[in-house]
Image (spheres, rainbow, N blue to C red):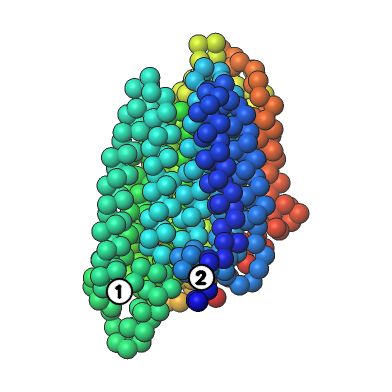
Amino acid sequence: MTEMMLPNLTPAYGEILMALGAMALLMLGVFRGNSSTRFISLISAALMIAALFITVNWQDTAVYTFGNMFVVDRFTSFMKILVLVASSLAVIMSIQYFKDEGEERFEYPILLLLATVGMMVMISANDLMSLYMGLELQSLSLYVLASIRRDSELSTEAGLKYFVLGALSSGILLFGSSLIYGFVGSTNFTVIGDTLAHANEHLGGHAPNIGVIVGMVFVLSGLAFKISAVPFHMWTPDVYQGAPTPVTAFFAVAPKVAALALLVRVLYVPFGELSHSWTQVIVFMSLASMVLGSVAAVVQTNIKRLMAYSSIGHIGFALVGLAAGNQEGVRGLMIYMAIYLVMNVGTFACILSMRRNNGMVEEISDLSGLVQTRPLMAVALGIFMLSLAGIPPMAGFWGKWYVFKAVIAKAVENPMATDYGLISLAVIGVVASVIGAYYYLNVVKIMFFNAPEEEFMPQKSFKMTAIMSFGAALMVLFLLPQVNAPILEYARMAAAALIS
């Protein structure tokens, strides 16, 4: 009798733990109702933290499971840690918000948990099928989260816009996947990469089948929507403004980290041989995102819309590292996203503290004279704004330093890189960063130099104060080797695991 071969589930223990926990918490919520929201939220955060410790991976070799459709290595470990940190903080930041709004729903932390499982599957995907499964698990949860406030027109509109455009992007991605399968004969990343490498060798370096390139472009377009890169950014401002603020904080970080990780793996593993084709696309998206994010944010008066355009711009900066097309560029991208996580979570913790007796306020003008009424919050938000602007010695400056350093080094080492516009990318990126500094510094000016408005209500949650304080301290202290060395070293090893 042939012995049945079972997959090695060890690499997926974190995902399995969170999926089982989500189902158990769903049953608990059904029987206990919304009164159990706080308990379910805390357990969800605890499950994410437990999965984080399971996910940490210092092994040199990659581990594959589920028929080579799921991979775990240092790269996936690094990006999953970022997603789990962002997701657990999003759960924690939402507890007091929904209590104050009187809208506690036990479904919220469970949907957040399921979305995080989808993101972890995306990051470890080594096949177009597992890619799509993870992407849809994440997306379906996010559609509901965006419109979870059913009585709010803005929230309902945000959910509907996100759903319609998200369904369109999923269709584009599926069409691209079908083209790739049709022309290559496989959906597995490793097999696709080997097939294209052999074809390239056989053709003597000539262009591969045009159908594969078209399929790759469609897949790239579908993923660009998920990271809200220009020209697939249209949904971002409206969804950020309409969704509840804790949901916006989650949207701004975790899904972007997961989608960027997936984009990096898709471009380097199956389509590494087509780098001459996709580099130009990445350069365009990076340039367009940096410029639009910097210019469009200047006229914004709502701080959540400002953060939406800010996130578009920062995705453009992160894509600079990907455009470099080498190990140093991927390392820079990973460092950038780690810093981006702290900057955005800290900023949204401050935004969630913008509450008066009549409820939440979101206008930038509401921050007038904040240093006189809430000095600690003003200092923390000022630090985050300076870091987002990339002003030294804040951590945001070093994030941009590593991605620009990688792309300039590539252009200097390889004169042919100028064909892809890498020097122009670096120059325009610096100019866009200067333009972007205007609206960040404008927020600082309003807080520190304008006449004070009505005082915000005191922050009731110690956890929120701790997130703001710790995040601001990290932004200031990042230049110390004791703080940045672990991140820089782990990012170096993670990039080396993906690109040998």
Is 301 situated left or right of 88 in this image? left
- Pointer 2 residue: 4
Amino acid bearing label 1: Gly
User: Eyeballing the image, is 164 above or below 425?
Assistant: above
Residue under the image location 50 percent in, 11 percent down = 358
**Residue 56 visible in this rendered orientation of the protein:** yes
Mark nearer the N terminus (1 vs 2): 2
User: Eyeballing the image, is 447 above or below 21?
Assistant: above
Q: Between residue 389 and residue 224, name the one nearer to us.
A: 224
User: Eyeballing the image, is 243 above or below 339?
Assistant: above
Is 234 situated left or right of 342 in this image? left
Q: Position of residue 213 (x, y in %)?
A: 28, 69
Amino acid bearing label 2: Met
Q: Between residue 315 and residue 197, name the one nearer to us.
A: 197
**Residue 422 visible in this rendered orientation of the protein:** no
Disc 1 versus disc 2: nearer the observer: 2
- Pointer 1 residue: 185
Give the CA separation, mark 1 to mark 2.
27 Å
Q: Between residue 151 and residue 46, name the one nearer to us.
A: 46
Residue lying farthest to the front in this orientation: 1
Secondary structure beneath label 1: loop
Quadrant the C terminus occupies: bottom right
Residue under the image location 45 percent in, 65 percent down = 69
Is 469 situated left or right of 40 in this image? right
Task: Check disc 2: other Cα within 10 Å, few if <14, some if 14-19, many if 20+.
Answer: few
